[in-house]
DNA sequence: GTACCCCTACTCGGATAGCGAGTGTCCGAGTCGGAATGG
DNA sequence: CCATTCCGACTCGGACACTCGCTATCCGAGTAGGGGTAC
């Protein structure tokens, strides 16, 4: 029950992309460098985001990734789906139908209580993640940052976009 | 981001234990047989529940596992903790502190927004699971069961307890 | 007949292999920009 | 001087090893109960 660390990587990467001037992007190598992450592995995760339509890619020199939608329309749940897939963590295998007492007598059309409870819990989890957008996160981070940090980021971005 | 199937197995096992006459229990082999599961693997999962204090074990003939608390005081979250451990699925590795702009200037005492958002989402998930007890699940299953199924279960249990 | 002891059978508990998903990396496919060249 | 062509560098994309945790199993540790034996 551990989430892939790719979710953390790409979430931070999307927040960084949201902080860029509109219409601009960054290559995967720069996104990895910004957080000192393995470039090749970061590239792999960005591919997943591209397949999911969260970001769009541009090849060639001055290419890279940029958000395919306004940052306010991208939620953390979108990123989780892109990296991990949208399947629920709890997968009911209907073991209640097996065994000596599970036989054919019962109509099992309705999900069992355990399945229903986990589904409800995961729905609450998803709802929370859907309610948080990359835009909010970027704004909050920008508001908290010190002036020194802000200038350092602007300088680094300017160097990469040049 | 897949939950161990041991959670499903032991959750069903606990519901079965809750349906037994008070004070009685069943060995791991019977719990596995009831749902047609691998006995050795089921035994391993029951060990985890025993270590976590959800069930208590008794050795020797006529031994087995029984709930260590009233079924209404055992939640699905207790079972998840016993099997998977209580650590959050999203583990923040503080990558924001790394890289060219992450340096020492910023005070990182407060968690980053991404970490906070995932923590909040998981808290909602946990709250849902904590709100569902094994007792409720057993009662709901008993209420839905047909008479035929109820007698089959009673007969099987009687055979095992004899 | 009764009390004690031993032995067997049954159960849990931890230590031990096997396997698959996530982790990590690399090289080929595709593309844009600029330099070189000819008109 | 300008248009065209070619080349190179840069980027994404998918294919290929590797590792760790979940899966699955087995055998030893411990115990309760029953049968046997001595008194």
Image (cartoon, coloured by chain):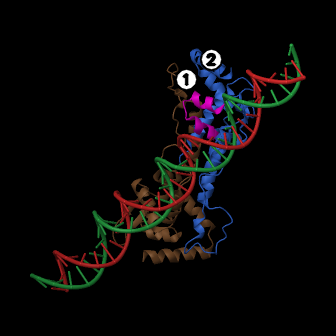
Chain colours: A blue, B brown, C red, D green
Q: Using the image as rendered, state which of residue B93 and residue B9 is in the foreground.
A: B93
Is residue B93 found left or right of A123 in the rendered image?
left
Mark 1 is surrounded, within 10 Å at the Cα level, by few (under 14), some (14 to 19) or many (20 or more) other residues, namely: some
Residue located beneath label 1 in the image: B100
The answer for which chain carries disc 2 is A
In this image, A149 relative to A75: left or right?
left
Q: Which residues are magenta?
A: A27-45
At x 64%, y 28%, the residue is A16
Q: Residue at x 55, y 23 (%)?
A: B100
Name the quadrant containing residue B138.
bottom right
Vertical comparison of A45 with B29: above or below: above
Q: Which secondary structure, mark 2? A: helix
On the image, numbered disc 2 is attached to which residue?
A155
Residue A90: image location, x then y, percent: 59, 54
Dot 1 and dot 2 residues touching (CB under 8 Å): no
| Cα distance in 3D space between marks 1 and 2 | 11 Å
Judged by its main secondary structure, the magenta piece is: helix
For residue D10, side relative to residue D6 (left or right): left
Whether residue A34 appears in magenta in the rendering, the answer is yes
Residue B69 lies in quadrant: bottom left
Q: Position of residue A144 (x, y in %)?
A: 59, 21
User: Residue C38 appears at what percent x and percent y?
Assistant: 85, 24
Q: Is residue A17 above or below residue B55?
A: above
Q: Dividing the image into 4 quarters, which one contains the C terminus of chain B? A: bottom left
Residue A144 visible in the current orientation = yes
């Amino acid at each position: 029950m551990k989430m892939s660390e790719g979710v953390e990587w790409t979430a931070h990467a999307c927040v960084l992309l949201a902080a860029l001037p509109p219409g601009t992007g960054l290559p995967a190598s720069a996104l990895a460098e910004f957080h000192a992450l393995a470039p090749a592995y970061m590239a792999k995760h960005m591919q997943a985001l591209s397949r999911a339509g969260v970001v769009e890619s541009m090849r060639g020199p001055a290419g890279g990734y940029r958000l395919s939608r306004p940052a306010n329309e991208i939620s953390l749940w979108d990123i989780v789906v892109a990296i991990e897939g949208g399947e629920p963590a709890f997968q009911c295998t209907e073991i209640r139908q097996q065994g000596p007492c599970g036989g054919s007598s019962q109509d099992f059309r309705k999900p069992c209580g355990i399945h229903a409870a986990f589904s409800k819990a995961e729905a609450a989890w998803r709802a929370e993640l859907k309610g948080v957008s990359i835009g909010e996160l970027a704004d909050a981070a920008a508001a908290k940052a010190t002036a020194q940090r802000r200038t350092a980021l602007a300088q680094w971005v300017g160097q990469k976009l040049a």
